Image: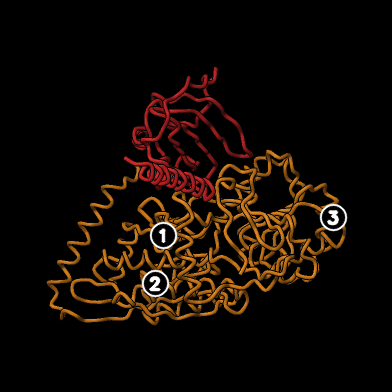
Chain colours: A red, B orange
Amino acid sequence: MNVATNHSARRRTRLRVLGALLGTLLLTACGGGATTPIAELTPCGPPERGLTDAPKLPAGFPNPRGVTYTEAEKAGPSDIIQGYFDGDLPAGFQTYRSAFQGSGYDVIKDEQEARDAEVFFAGRGRSGQVRLDAECQGRTNVTITIRPS
Amino acid sequence: MPFRKRPRLLHSGTAAVLATLAAACSGRPAGDAADLLIVVNAPFSKSPYIGRTISQGVRLAVDEINSRGGVQVAGRAYRFRVQMLDNALSPQKALQNVRTAVARGAVAIVDEGTGIEASWRVAHEARTPIGIVFQGGIGLVELRSRPNVFRIAPTDHGIAFRYAEYLIPKGLKVGFIHDDSDYGQQGAIAFREAFGRNPEAVAADIGVPADLGDPSPQVLEARRAGSTALLVWGTSSTIANVLRAARNSGWDVPVYTPPSGQDPLVRQQLSDHPEWIDGLTFASGRMTAERGPQPFLDFRAKYEEAFGVDRVGVETSSGEDVIQPPEYAMYPYDFVNVLAAAVRAAAGPDPVRLLDALNQVDVQGANGDERGFNEKNHEGVVDDDVYFALFDDMTFRPVRDDPLSSTLPVIEQTA
């Protein structure tokens, strides 16, 4: 390989890197759900510690195995509960969809995309969503919003 | 048992195949064509921006469907035609329009929402579906008692509860001002449900007539009650009048509104004091979906190619013309596409089969989100898709102190 070939190969590499950087910048700038393939998830660090006192969920509300709650707060009339699921996004999505069956809450809509998913529910005088975000390999963040309906 | 996507789609597909077979065996000549009437019942004279937005959303979808040859079912093509009827924000006029639509055999009514309390029944007797695409009133859509009423628009429940979740943790004392339009009264119901559990967050709850020119006494009442924020729920004129009264009196209180706050009329009426618009915050349905802004931008390009840009009639401080993104045109556009999918699934416009099919089909909406209804839900926009946007220099951008809003991109609003 001569110097000219080396030079043009380096230039192509630089262009590719520049292209990738520009692509990443564009995705970041656009925001609002620009997605990253699941394969790009990084390995998980140590998990956050769970709450000492489990949040008080409404009667019958799904409390699936593998979910650890890390934060619970009131936002006006609504409850917002955060935590994580030990498993990937598709597993978390299926877990919650199944857990709502027979719970007294109807799943009124659901959506799963590459990096996030939502299960919208209504029943027992409440409505809201379970939002799932792929955080790292094998762990999925869970945010539950429960409102009076 | 919760609604499950896959069986529903299978059911939908099976129903479509069976219905297609039934139609194919009915002896109708292949290649037959028929027109299906969609009536748009909207306030063209009283709220021209809303009326125009709704009608243009419908027309864009209809033109696209018709240009593809209509809805093809078993060798028969169903094309849509559209008729606009002005409800003038009058429940009586809206009811009369629905009667007219039914008498003319409309396949569906795309409705702004005024007068639904009475008009849904007239449509129901004829099994005519109504798609509400603007008003979000809590009682307007009732799955069991009003099976022919559907909605693709942010609900008042979603807006009021999202505001409660956003404003109460800030420690604000909300002065609530609503007008006596259908829109304002429905908003008052939603506000009281959302804020009723936190009375400490409500300083005042005041009604004003929608045609009141100067609400200064009511604004003063809210101020004297200790309000540290105003939530104004009413027509665009009411919002402009309240904002003018507050700023004229030197009260720099933060002002929040439902989607009507983004109506160009608010900015037009206050164009002599553009600084009064700065900081005005409204709640609405997110324009862009999880997958990013491109589907909405594509829709916007089609809309603006067909109808031109919606000029607000004001300029930024640097002299650029301000234009309005076609947010509320998405909803009628999506409803017509859901309707077309239902006509296909029902193998034609038979009212009973069509109503059933509306509970079965989904389409990809203008912003890339899935739009559709099911046996558990006739709402096309979920509460959690409500976001907040703040005006600055006559254009708006999503707020940064709300988890959902902070993830949303700024949509271009200058020509």
Query: Is B409 rendered above or below residue B184?
Result: above
Identify the residue at image location x=74%, y=43%.
B172
Q: Outermost residue toward the front?
A: A2
Q: Quick one: SS at disc 1?
A: loop
Amino acid tagged 3:
Trp
Circle 3 residues within 10 Å: few <14, some 14–19, many ≥20: some
Which chain is disc 3 placed on? Answer: B
Q: Quick one: SS at disc 3?
A: loop
Q: Which disc number belongs to residue B108?
A: 2
Whole-percent x, y for residue A54 in the image: 52, 22
Do marks 3 and 1 both belong to one polypeptide chain? Answer: yes
Which residue is disc 1 drawn over? B365
Which residue is disc 3 drawn over? B251
Identify the residue at image location x=70%, y=63%.
B394
Query: Is B81 rendered above or below residue B378?
Result: below
Distance from disc 3 to disc 2, alpha carbons, whole Å, reads 47 Å
Nearest to viewer (mark 3 / mark 2): 3
Q: Outermost residue toward the top?
A: A52
Distance from disc 3 to disc 1, alpha carbons, whole Å, reads 42 Å
Can residue B189 be seen in this snapshot?
no
Amino acid tagged 2:
Ala
Q: Does label 3 or label 1 sit earlier along the sequence?
A: 3
